[in-house]
Image: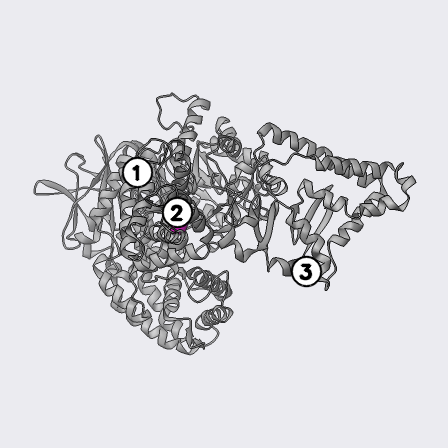
């Protein structure tokens, strides 16, 4: 990696209100905190008003809404001047296409399959529906096509020297061939006005010449790149000729405008829209209601978002064009590495990553023997114990597997059955989690992604017809088998490649497992159908010579489909339905895994150190379902299920009067009400919500519940909202949070929140220290250096008060500079509600990483033994490099101990010092005090009460 050594990363969420200039202004603060590298949402030109930057419309320029190029360079200089670096967020899977502002997409809509950019997008030009052959479905209309047309919501116009279709804010092009439909309409009326004069009319002659030129425009789908460029030149000549004619001949201009008025029809006269209907049918796109997208869309999307069209980055020309700006910034030394968004959406993720590294070796002057000259991390969701492909030339992932491993430490796995019984009694729900996942994935495949599944089914049907042993498999059975296998797929996707390379053992295991489970779940489908699909996925089917491409295309498309189905089915559906313990419903998480033991944590961290020591260690991101500290607090509930049950039961009785009945169902139902109480517990700040903040807090909860309910798709959905249910829940939230009257619910809720907040705070500090010291690169989401009670996007993208953070950090730096800061740290703990203790812990922890860089970057990870009555409530490890050692000790599962967590209960509990360290004295990295181990038998040990004397986490540096 070029520039400084990577020690800690920080994500800034750039947008129109926080751009390059603001990022420049916080650089000094981040440097003082100990951050070495920043990254942000994409900096490339995106849709106007984009809040996330992942809807890029032009890879060749920066987003002007974030600032000027000079402001960007100024930010980069401020980073480099402080020995910091910038990691660029790359969106390689898709582009934004809303309102046809993307020039590539606009060209495709104008020219169809003959467009220069037709190959850049993953479009099926020969879909199942014959009416769509050679066209792109555009599901952008608010109602059915005929209704929108006859309501005059669409119209033709000639503006900015172009013929366009106007619909709302959208401007769609007319195909060049169809220009003649408008220009030639009623042409005979011009010719008949005065035949003698017409023969000498230069404007009319030019119009006829233009019509001839349009008629001779080439329009072949299989044209070569040179032929497409030639067609583009001819088209632009014609466009300019029309513009000149319209500008210079008022008679022709009036004639064309009169035609346009005729095409746009008359309200109340349906037949008057026939001309416009005929004109629209000549286009390379088919306008349709947004509701038909799920079944008929013929371009690959990012998940099921119609405004994000997938691109074919596997094509060299597309790869080069979409990475031009990123490569320039890398060559110029302004960027130190790349973060790849949604790598699972790509045709061949491994091949793409190899392309990046090959470019780096070629362009950055790296030694050819260096496997990874370019720092790259990928956004990748891993299943339980799913290994990241070791053939990928990357440093690791963006850290979701780390997040969930750390989170699991603070969930009491011994209480799982009790907690499950509690959830079942309160909500009446007993469906096993795997069945819920299966049903949700089936729902996604039959609703929002039905088109993708149907395409796979027809592809498979064509392949089955080529073999006498499979030709009798029906289209219906093949399509249903595909659904079953995907619904049973245990991971987001496999990584089978084209060509002779064999399927990895990793992928074989997942495919066999999915097919076996699919057979069990649906015995009505013949086993031989499942076996046929399995043989294709495993590359065991041997097609006739010259026919392998189509088989490989099916496999690659299948792999690109399992990932979005899984993400939409689990993260965006089940995580809002299965509310047993919300802190487990996290991106990359497995809610059925109710906590992990320290031994599992140690095993995973040891593996991480061996394989991916530079992977990011995240505890919050722009995509997480709730703030890291909200999650840490909710984990406390796992330790006190009986008390939690009693509270929830009481609250449901107190608030029963605010529920309403509609069509014999409660609003909210018990599961949604249970979701709400957990959400309130996690999001409520440590200090009381002030009167002037109450309305804003209530509104945030209402917005969260609206999103959660629509994502769950049980009572209401985005595409088919249930207004009664939506409004009923909104009113319920308003009523139970009303503080303008006596409120028995809040009188009981707030003391309980205080009851678990102390233990939650200890969990928060523990997970923060683990992130900083465990194998990997600690990663911080903007603002999370103070308490993070955020909810899901867009709540977690609210503005961050950096002025406050800068002021607090300067005060904490003064404390940290003192030789003995024990009393000051104790004071920070006493006033923990203001968040300074968390910020201080990050400051001290990152200072330790910087001071002892070799220990963290090259040292071993060694689990440490604890002994004594509270040993099971500790996790401890050391980072060892030669004679240097850093020890980390954190408490876990302390809900019944939190009031005493820093005193006597730890007196008889000890942590062993590694025998190979040789350290006979330690310095407390937080307080600066010396800690001397005691000899107990053959070992040296430190007393935990001494480690936790000032703060309930320990960071000890050997000397």
**CA gap, disc 2 and disc 3:** 40 Å
Task: Check disc 2: other Cα within 10 Å, few if <14, some if 14-19, many if 20+.
Answer: many
Residue 832 visible? The answer is no
Q: Which mark is residue 563?
A: 2
Nearer to us: label 2 or label 1:
1
- Work out whether mark 2 precedes mark 1 in sequence or the reverse, and give the earlier one: 1
Q: Residue furthest left?
A: 937
Horizontal and vertical percent position of residue 766:
29, 50
Dot 2 falls on a residue whose secondary structure is helix
Residue 565 forms part of the magenta stretch: yes
Dot 1 falls on a residue whose secondary structure is loop
Residue 149 forms part of the magenta stretch: no
**Residue in the picture at 69% in, 46% down:** 164
Residue that carries the numbered disc 3 in the rendered image: 150
Quadrant of residue 523 in the image? bottom left
The residue stretch that appears in magenta: 563-567
- Work out whether mark 2 precedes mark 3 in sequence or the reverse, and give the earlier one: 3
**CA gap, disc 1 and disc 3:** 54 Å
Residue 660 visible? The answer is yes
The rendered magenta stretch, by its main secondary structure, is classed as: helix
Residue that carries the numbered disc 1 in the rendered image: 540
- Tags 2 and 1 touching, CB below 8 Å: no
Q: Quadrant of the N terminus?
A: top left
Horizontal and vertical percent position of residue 915:
14, 37
Position above or below: 187 against 268: above
**CA gap, disc 2 and disc 1:** 23 Å
Nearer to us: label 2 or label 3:
3
Q: Which mark is residue 10?
A: none
Horizontal and vertical percent position of residue 270:
70, 61
């Amino acid at each position: 990696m070029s520039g400084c050594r990577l020690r800690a990363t920080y994500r800034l969420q750039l947008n129109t209100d926080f751009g390059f200039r603001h990022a420049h202004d916080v650089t000094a603060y981040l440097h003082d905190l100990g951050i070495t590298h920043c990254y942000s949402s994409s900096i490339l030109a995106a849709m106007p008003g984009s809040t996330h930057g992942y809807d890029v419309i032009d890879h060749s320029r920066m987003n002007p809404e974030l600032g000027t190029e000079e402001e960007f360079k100024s930010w980069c200089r401020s980073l480099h001047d402080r020995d910091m670096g910038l990691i660029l967020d790359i969106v390689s899977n898709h582009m934004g296409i809303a309102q046809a502002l993307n020039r590539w997409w606009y060209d495709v809509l104008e020219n169809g399959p003959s467009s220069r950019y037709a190959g850049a997008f993953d479009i099926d030009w020969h879909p199942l529906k014959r009416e769509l052959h050679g066209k792109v479905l555009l599901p952008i209309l608010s109602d059915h096509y005929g209704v929108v047309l006859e309501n005059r919501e669409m119209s033709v116009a000639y503006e900015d020297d172009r013929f366009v279709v106007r619909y709302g804010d959208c401007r769609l092009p007319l195909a060049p061939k169809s220009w003649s439909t408008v220009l030639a309409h009623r042409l005979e009326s011009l010719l008949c006005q005065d035949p003698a004069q017409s023969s000498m009319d230069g404007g009319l002659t030019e119009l006829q010449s233009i019509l001839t030129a349009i008629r001779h425009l080439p329009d072949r789908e299989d044209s070569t790149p040179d032929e497409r460029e030639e067609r583009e030149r001819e088209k632009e000549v014609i466009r300019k000729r029309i513009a000149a004619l319209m500008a210079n001949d008022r008679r022709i201009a009036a004639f064309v405008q009169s035609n346009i008025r005729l095409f746009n029809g008359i309200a109340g006269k349906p037949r008057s829209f026939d001309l416009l209907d005929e004109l629209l049918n000549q286009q390379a796109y088919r306008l349709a209601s947004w509701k038909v997208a799920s079944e008929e869309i013929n371009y690959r999307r990012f998940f099921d978002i119609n405004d994000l069209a997938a691109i074919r980055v596997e094509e060299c020309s597309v790869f080069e064009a979409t990475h031009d700006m990123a490569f320039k910034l890398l060559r110029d030394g302004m960027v130190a590495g790349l973060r790849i968004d949604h790598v699972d959406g790509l045709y061949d993720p491994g091949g793409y990553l190899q392309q990046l590294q090959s470019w780096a070796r070629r362009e950055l002057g790296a030694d050819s023997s260096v496997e990874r000259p370019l720092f790259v991390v990928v956004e990748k969701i891993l299943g339980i114990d799913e290994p990241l492909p070791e053939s990928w030339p990357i440093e690791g992932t963006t850290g979701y597997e780390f997040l969930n491993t750390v989170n699991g430490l603070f969930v009491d796995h011994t209480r799982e059955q009790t907690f499950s019984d509690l959830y079942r009694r309160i909500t009446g729900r007993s469906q096993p989690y795997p069945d819920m996942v299966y049903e949700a994935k089936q729902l996604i495949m039959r609703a929002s992604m039905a088109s993708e599944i149907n395409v796979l089914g027809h592809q498979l049907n064509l392949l089955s017809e080529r073999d006498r042993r499979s030709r009798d498999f029906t289209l219906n059975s093949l399509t249903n088998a595909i659904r079953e296998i995907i619904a049973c797929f245990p991971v987001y996707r496999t990584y089978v490649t084209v060509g002779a390379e064999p399927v990895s053992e990793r992928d074989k295991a997942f495919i066999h497992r999915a097919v076996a489970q699919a057979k069990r779940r649906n015995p009505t489908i013949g086993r031989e159908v499942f076996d046929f699909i399995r043989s294709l996925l495993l590359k065991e089917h041997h097609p006739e010579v010259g026919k392998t491409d189509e088989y490989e295309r099916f496999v690659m498309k299948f792999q690109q489909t399992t990932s979005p189905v899984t993400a939409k089915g689990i993260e965006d559906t089940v995580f809002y339905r299965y509310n047993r313990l919300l802190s487990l419903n996290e991106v990359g998480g497995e809610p059925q895994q109710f906590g992990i033991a320290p031994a599992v944590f140690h095993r995973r961290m040891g593996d991480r150190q061996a394989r991916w020591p530079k992977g990011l260690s995240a505890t919050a991101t722009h995509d997480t379902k709730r703030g890291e500290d909200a999650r840490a607090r909710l984990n406390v509930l796992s330790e006190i299920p009986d008390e939690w049950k009693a509270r929830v039961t009481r609250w449901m009785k107190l608030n029963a009067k605010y529920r309403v009945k509609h069509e014999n169902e409660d609003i909210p139902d018990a599961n949604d009400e249970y979701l709400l109480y957990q959400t309130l517990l996690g999001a409520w700040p440590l200090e009381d919500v002030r009167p002037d903040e109450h309305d804003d807090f209530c509104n945030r909860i209402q917005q969260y519940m609206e999103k959660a309910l629509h994502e769950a798709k049980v009572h209401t959905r985005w595409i088919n909202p249930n207004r009664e249910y939506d409004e009923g829940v909104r009113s319920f939230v308003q009523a139970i949070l009303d503080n303008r009257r006596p409120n028995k619910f809040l009188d009981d809720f707030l003391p309980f929140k205080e009851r678990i907040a102390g233990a939650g705070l200890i969990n928060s500090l523990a997970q923060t220290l683990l992130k900083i010291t465990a194998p990997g690169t600690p990663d911080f989401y903007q603002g999370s250096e103070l308490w993070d009670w955020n909810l899901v996007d867009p709540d977690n993208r609210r503005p961050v008060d950096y002025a406050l953070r800068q002021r607090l950090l300067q005060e904490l730096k003064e404390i940290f500079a003192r030789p003995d800061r024990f009393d000051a740290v104790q004071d920070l703990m006493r006033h923990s509600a203001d968040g300074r203790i968390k910020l201080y812990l990050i400051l001290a922890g990152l200072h330790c990483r910087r001071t002892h860089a070799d220990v963290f970057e090259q040292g071993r990870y060694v689990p440490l033994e604890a002994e004594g009555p509270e040993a099971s409530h500790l996790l401890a490890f050391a980072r060892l490099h030669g004679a240097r050692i850093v020890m980390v000790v954190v408490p876990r599962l302390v809900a019944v101990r939190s009031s005493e967590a820093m005193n006597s209960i730890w007196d008889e509990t000890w942590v062993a010092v590694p025998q190979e360290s040789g350290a006979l004295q330690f310095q407390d990295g937080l307080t600066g005090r010396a800690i001397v181990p005691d000899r107990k038998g053959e070992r040296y040990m430190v007393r935990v009460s001494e480690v936790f004397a000032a703060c309930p986490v320990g960071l000890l540096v050997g000397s």
